[in-house]
Structures are given as C-alpha cells and as structure tokens.
Amino acid sequence: MDRDELIFQEYKMYAEQKENFIDRNFKTNKFYMVSLFAVLLAMIFTSNVVFMERISAILLFSLMGIAICALWFMNVDSYNILIKIKFANVLEAIEEKLPVRPFSEEYKGIEEFRNKKVFMFSDIQKLVASIAALFFFAVFISEVSPLVMKIVVKITSLITSSQGGI
C-alpha cells in the first residue's frame, strides 16, 4: 500500500468515525426528548401524589425536568465542540494531503450559512431544551409558591403571637 492510499484509508476511517459520532449525537438527543416526555407524563399521572404532607410529585418531577434540560443543553455544546475540533480539524488536516477537500468545502459553506444568522440544528436543540426548562421552572415555581407562603404565614403568626398579638 503506497503512502497516498494509506492517507486515503485513514481519511476514510476518520470520516466514518465522524458520521458514527453524529449518529450517536442524534440518539442522545432522542434520549433527552423521550426523557422529557416521560417526566411530563409522570407529572400528569402523579399530579395528586404528595410526599411528607407538603412536597408534591410534580415538584420533584419539575426539578428532574430542569436537570434533564440543563444536561441536554450542555450535551449539545459538547457534541458541537467535539465535532468541530476533534473531527473537522483532523479531517481538514488530512485533506491537505488529498487532491479533493470535501469536508473543508462543507465547513466553509456552513460558516457562510451560519454568518447569515440562520438557525442551525444545534440552535434548535438548545432552543427546545431552553423552552422545556422554562416550562419545568414555571411548574416548579407554581408548586413551591404555596409552600413558601405557608412558611411565611407560620413565621408571621409566630412572631405576632410572641409579641403579644394584635
């Protein structure tokens, strides 16, 4: 096997690894979406469940939903960084030794497209994760507010009664 054939085989192998990595990224996104859907269903079916006389299942599941959204958002960033640095840079370096540079040209096209301020798929994923996190946060606040108000009323009544009352 001559040097050019060896370079081409390495390039081909790395390009396949990049595609496998991107496929794994899509599977990870499916996992997060299914997880959020499962948490939402759990919230619906356990809406009347209360632990320790105050903490509702909805409160716990909303916290879980926020955590899943945060992990998903961070995961999107990590995959983007790994794809850009680990794969794109290495493939571009190997392409310099080849007569044709498809990934370099693709990357230039993506950068030009991105400079037009158009949403990319990763931006949409982050948007969905952010909107879902806001939803779960709103549910969390709606569940925590009555608990906080009960504590405030109890503290106020204790203070009032200890001062002789009104």
Image (cartoon, grey):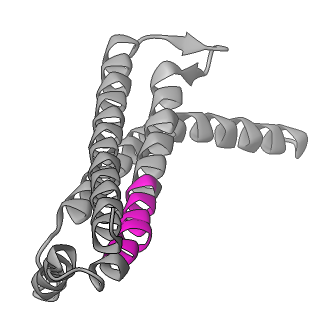
Which quadrant would the C terminus be assigned to in this image?
A: top right
Q: Can you say whether 75 is above or below 60 in the image?
A: below
Q: Quadrant of residue 94?
A: bottom left
Say if 66 sits above or below 150 in the image.
below
- Counting from the top left corner in percent of width and height, residue 91 is at 33, 72
The reply to whether residue 6 is in sight is: yes
**Residue 90 on the magenta span:** yes
The mark total stands at 0
Report if residue 122 lies within the magenta region: no
In depth, the one of 55 and 4 nearer the eye is 4
Q: Is residue 66 above or below residue 53?
A: below
Q: Give the extent of the magenta segment.
A: 75-91
Q: Percent position (x, y) of residue 93?
A: 36, 81
Magenta-colored segment: predominant secondary structure: helix
Q: Looking at this view, is 106 or 75 the one in front?
A: 106
Q: Residue at x 36, y 40 (%)?
A: 28
